[in-house]
Amino acid sequence: MKKTAIVITPMCQVSHGVYGIRLELREKTWFKTWAFPMKPATAEREGFQSKTDLSNMSADAVFPGCPYCQSKTLVQCGDCGKIYCYKGERESTCPWCGKTGTISDGGWDSVAGGGY
């Protein structure tokens, strides 16, 4: 059976390293299955997903989290719309644009990675 999978490109809030997350579609849910460090030039060259509907996303039991800080949680910046990992703090600073905001659980319609 053919699997549907994509790669999104968040940034680590701690190291500012870009990385890829492989998402696999199972039924109607996107599962984070693995993550790997990458150079921004690689993400741009490979054309990894920068926007997709991820309103229903979960982590697979074996998902290792961010390859830099091991966080398994993603947040979307309310200013630039890009995604990054975070450690659960109430206020967070986006490593992409540098804006700080309060984290809310407003859900996701779509996400933007590195804009590649």
Image (cartoon, helix red, strand yellow):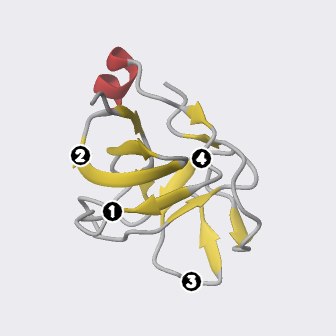
**Mark in front: 1 vs 3:** 1
Circle 4: residue type? Leu
Task: Tell whether label 2 touches label 1 (CB within 8 Å).
Answer: no
Gap in angstroms between the C-alphas marked 4 and 2? 21 Å
Per the image, label 2 sits on a secondary structure element best described as: strand
Q: In this view, does 50 lie to the left or right of 4?
A: right
Q: CA–CA distance between discs 1 and 3?
A: 23 Å
Image marks 3 and 2: residues in contact by CB distance under 8 Å: no
Q: Nearer the viewer, mark 1 or mark 2?
A: 1
**Mark 1 or mark 2, which has the lower sequence index?**
2
Q: In which quarter of the image is residue 93?
A: bottom right
Earlier in the chain: of badge 3 and badge 2, it is 2
Q: Position of residue 60 (x, y in %)?
A: 33, 62
Give the labeled residue for mark 3.
Answer: 89
Question: The residue under label 1 is which amino acid type?
Answer: Asp
Query: Crowding near pointer 1: few (<14 within 10 Å), some, many (20+)?
Result: some
- Dot 1 corresponds to which residue? 60
Is 107 in front, or is 28?
Answer: 28
- Residue under label 2, please give it: 37
In the foreground, 64 or 39: 64
Above or below, comparing residue 55 to residue 86 in the picture: above
Q: Name which of mark 4 and mark 2 comes first in the sequence.
A: 2
Q: Which of marks 1 and 3 is nearer the N terminus?
A: 1
Cα distance, mark 3 to mark 2? 23 Å
Label 3 to label 4: alpha-carbon separation: 22 Å
Q: Considering only vertical position in the picture, is 94 above or below 48?
A: below
- Residue 34 pos. (x, y %): 25, 52
What residue is disc 4 on?
54
- Mark 3: amino acid: Glu
User: Mark 3 or 4 closer to N-term?
Assistant: 4
The residue depicted at 25 percent of the width and 38 percent of the height is 38
Picture coordinates of residue 81, whole percent (x, y): 68, 45
